[in-house]
Image: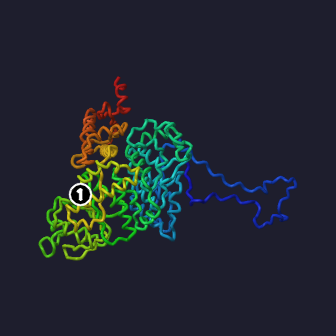
Amino acid sequence: MAEAKDSPRGSSSTPLLSPVSSSISPHSEHEPVNDSGIESEWEREPEPPKTPEPPDSSKWNFWLPRIPPPPSFQPGGLDGSAGFSIRDLVGAVQHDTPYEQILAYLSHHSHPSANSVKAHINDPVEGFSAMFYAAATNNEWIIRLFFKYGGNVNAVYGSPPLPLLLFAIANSKTIEYDTTTSVATLLSLGADASVIPKAFYSPFCQDLPERGPSDEDLDNLDDLKIQWCKSLDTRAMVAETLNLTQRYHLEKSSKLEKPTERQRQVAVRNYSEDLFGIPYFLIGQSAATQLLMKELLHGMLRHRRDPLVLVFAGPSGHGKTELARRLGALLSLELHVSDCTIVSRENEFFGSRKPYVGAAEGSPLNNFLARKDGQKCISFLDEFEKASPDIWNSLLIPFDKGEYQDRRDLRTINCSRTIWILATNALDEQIEEYCKKNEEIFNEEDATTRETHLETLTENMKEEFKSRFKPPLTGRISSFIPFLPFSLSETCVGTHKYLLELASEVHRPVNTSFGDREQLLGNIRLKIRLDASVCKTLAKGYDPQLGIRSLRKVVRDTVATKLDYEYMLTHDLIKEGVEMENYVVFVTNGKIKILRVPSKKDAAAPAASN
């Protein structure tokens, strides 16, 4: 492909100059005379430059051009005067330049007096929008960084328009790594799920035909957004690479209520726009994420000065810790987790007060709060029901006034901006019983009925919490957030999560050295044939009391064990630097099976021996 010269958006080739000077009057005696009445070549207006035809996207193989690394990628170049170059940025990204350097480069060229980044962040490089190169990294934070500086998550390539979201899905085959996080990130940033027809993902927990949906299953193929489906090869590529978790995210995106302009405005003013992406990084728990986002937006709108104290209640393994971690990551808030099962007294939790023995050391929680004095942060108190009453009492002032006394020097700490999360299993019985009697609470299609049930459930939770933890503590709780049991289809997504983790683990290269670096099981491509069928079979081992952790055990005990046995049936020695081996997981007669797929080398071996 010829190297394209990058130019600012909206610029074009310089038009041809007319042979007639602009200073000459139309009736000048110097004007050529044409008595024939036919326009002469001298008089004819120059034709405008033709817009080149967009490339045929149906012939693209999903590989991006390789851009050379820039000679220098320091902001301003070697002499400090160089301007922003989208080509240099893309070249740096393609050659694994560290995130911090890319951030520094973009920040340098984004000051108000010379904000050239947003003007050119979507410019094409070798025919592709720069966002395609960001997505190709399969790095969530690179994608977010490009978006922050104006990158278009709905960028397209060629004709018919091939969407960035589709490229992120198909990219897994190119790079031989799972791209589910990249797909979820694009959706969380506003990528339009409707560019992928619903026949590919709704319902998400069913197997796709090998070549994708038929024409009869695809609605309105004349719609420009989905005309890429007319290419049977592209359709088959998407069917091959679109996994169960990605289908889940697409279906969820098509149902999620989008944030209003006012909600987005409030979030942006508080540097919290990524808050709206939380539902894409959690299995189920749409009620919990919805209630959490409402509470956070309410606090932002009111400039709340009192601490935010939340109760995350529900069975173990249903996403309480994961939601707290995701909240911290997306909003760039430091998270501290305190395990209430390992402390029995208040001075173990916060540390001894000066001048008692041990006061100088403080405690992990004490020192965290002191270090984050006056700053936003998250304090997650896990299994809070196992904390003692003196610990509950010691939290009353921090929860009420947002003040805390550093045990080491008795200095008053401002913790009014701390988000306190009390995670507990104490209300499991109330949540489970209510959900059994009121299954409408799971129906996301009927928002009004669901919201009524959630209000009733949270009131019940508050009353039960009051009876267990007493009114003074209950009166300081900002919101009760229930974590509901998983549905059957959600357990399939949980199963798929652990299958993806296993595939990533065994994809790593073999390392035959002794010690911590040893990895004898590696260089494996683990394929899941008909992933919905595989996950439904494995999900039968789901235990509601253990939550998603029970699915991890099923995958380890079933798939990982069978893979180990199959891997060791080969007579070849385990070596470093050998080619990848292919294994496939599938279901037959209701049983999970794993087989090694012979390579071309294996197939040629018998012929060579003959």
Q: Nearer the viewer, residue 321 or 610?
A: 321
Image height check: is 314 above or below 229?
below
Q: What residue sits 63% from the left and 57% below the top?
A: 13
Can residue 504 be seen in this snapshot?
A: no
Task: Give the x, y percent position of residue 291.
Answer: 35, 59
Task: Give the x, y percent position of residue 61.
Answer: 49, 42
Image height check: is 361 above or below 384?
below
Corner quadrant of residue 458: bottom left
* Residue ranking furthest to the left: 357
Corner quadrant of residue 427: bottom left
Tell whether 81 sits left or right of 563: right
Q: Nearer the viewer, residue 177 or 187?
A: 187
Can residue 371 be seen in this snapshot?
A: yes
Task: Give the x, y percent position of residue 103.
Answer: 42, 62
Image quadrant where one finds the C terminus? top left
Looking at the rendered structure, the secondary structure element under dot 1 is strand
Q: Nearer the viewer, residue 369 or 237?
A: 369
Task: Give the x, y percent position of residue 580.
Answer: 35, 39
Question: Mark 1, residues whose alpha carbon is within 10 Å: few (<14), some, or many (≥20)?
Answer: many
Q: How many marks?
A: 1
Tell whether 83 sits left or right of 293: right
Instruction: Say what amino acid the circle numbered 1 marks.
Output: Thr
Corner quadrant of residue 374: bottom left
In the picture of the structure, the residue carrying the numbered disc 1 is 424
Image height check: is 136 above or below 393?
above
Q: What residue sits 43% from the left and 53% below the top?
A: 186
* Residue ranking furthest to the top: 610
Q: Nearer the viewer, residue 104 or 158?
A: 158
